[in-house]
Amino acid sequence: MNVILLSPHFPPSSYQFAVALRRAGVNVLGIADAPYDSLRPELRSALTEYYRVNDMNDYDQLLRAVAYLTFRHGKIDRFESHIEYWLNTEARIRSDFNIPGIRQDQIADMKFKSLMKEKFIAAGIEVARGRVVRSLEEAQALIDEVGYPVVAKPDSGVGAANTYRINDETELEGFFGAKPPVDYIMEEFIRGTIYSFDGLAGSDGAPIFYTSHVFAQGIMETLNEDQDLYYYSLRELPEDLLDAGLRALQEFGISERFFHIEFFRTDDDQIVALEVNMRPPGHPTMDMFNYANDADLYRAWADLVAGRPVRNDYTRPYFCGYAGRKQHKHYRYSHDEIVQSLGASLVHQEALSPIFAPVMGNYAYIFRSPDESEIHEAIRYVLEVRR
């Protein structure tokens, strides 16, 4: 079996997909723009062959790379990156080389927020009122229906880049005066807490593994207001969240993929769909899956792809939390004090790539406990600032 991994070195934990595939008996091939010698040793050992391109955004280079690897190793059985940025590229390559998985004619529902909204509605899940608006007049007509504030975000976009909360007419006019030349969807502002429904879908589309995370605030607020991000997993999922998550998963009809579906729990305790991401949650949430379950979800995915037996008896024995600190902020407790205070509950720490810093922070702490109150205390301790 031949699997090509696009960008197998990034994010940093991605190498574990290659390692797990190799252990499952798969012939693992890599394509990226990084020098081979810069890849970590575990990744180099897992790859049968690596093809370096100069520019990963140049589709012709990727096309030649896949053609070369096909010539060298035979038919390609899977092509994956596990990164939202490359979803369109993955689908295009699969279509051009007849590789199983999401193809070009299927990707729109998973990339355009307006189409996601239609899928959620078809699944019987409440959504924020809104639509694509292409002019100030169209936006004003929507605001007449839903009122201020509203959120404007690219209909097709990654994360919360170029996403804005608009509170009044002055800000609305300013937004249209500077709006990038892409379609924007505008929606009513939902007051509530973000809950995710995360997991791994099996070959029949049913989840082999699922969990949920509760977030301090949205990525828009984290970016635009320079807030600290924290979030944590649940041991038991609320029934309404589980129901909505399963219905959304069925409606989108994916298989053999990780998923990350976001919902609001509103202030009046309703579940409202936000968006889907048909890939693993952002780094380092994959590792949080494993810490919360004493599991190896990299291996589960690799076994699934390779057609091997897959573990599905996850019991979520721990809450698992994340807190990221930003280097320009002045926190009350030092790194050494955090390590000493959290003790054995601190299961992972790392300096993050600057590309993640605006959202995830410059330094990450991951901790776990069977007691939810200990997770909240750890978050408070890590992120408390000096007064």
Image (cartoon, grey):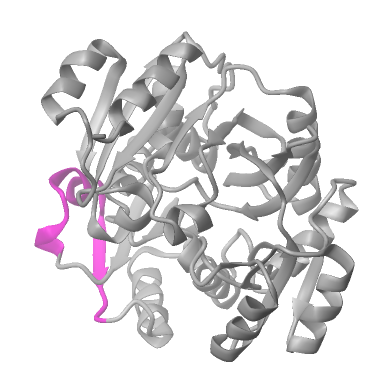
Looking at the image, residue 338 lies above or below residue 154: above
Looking at the image, residue 301 lies above or below residue 34: above
Residue 245 place in picture, x, y as percent: 73, 38
**Residue 312 figure quarter:** top right
- Quadrant in the picture for the C terminus: top left
Question: Is-magenta flag for residue 31?
Answer: no
Residue 318 place in picture, x, y as percent: 47, 14
Along the line of sight, which residue is nearer the eye, 322 or 98? 322
Query: How many numbered marks appear?
Result: 0
Residue at 45% of width from left, 39% of height from top? 302
Along the line of sight, which residue is nearer the eye, 191 or 103? 191
Give the extent of the magenta segment: 36-54
Residue 281 place in picture, x, y as percent: 49, 45
Q: Can residue 256 be seen by looking at this rendering?
A: no
Along the line of sight, which residue is nearer the eye, 330 or 36? 330
Residue at 81% of width from left, 64% of height from top? 147
Q: Can residue 229 be seen by looking at this rendering?
A: yes
**Residue 164 figure quarter:** bottom right
Q: Horizontally, is 234 left or right of 373 in the view? A: right
**Residue 356 figure quarter:** bottom left
Q: Horizontally, is 370 left or right of 28 in the view? A: right
Looking at the image, residue 217 lies above or below residue 347: below
Residue at 38% of width from left, 85% of height from top? 58
Residue at 45% of width from left, 32% of height from top? 297
Residue 277 place in picture, x, y as percent: 59, 54
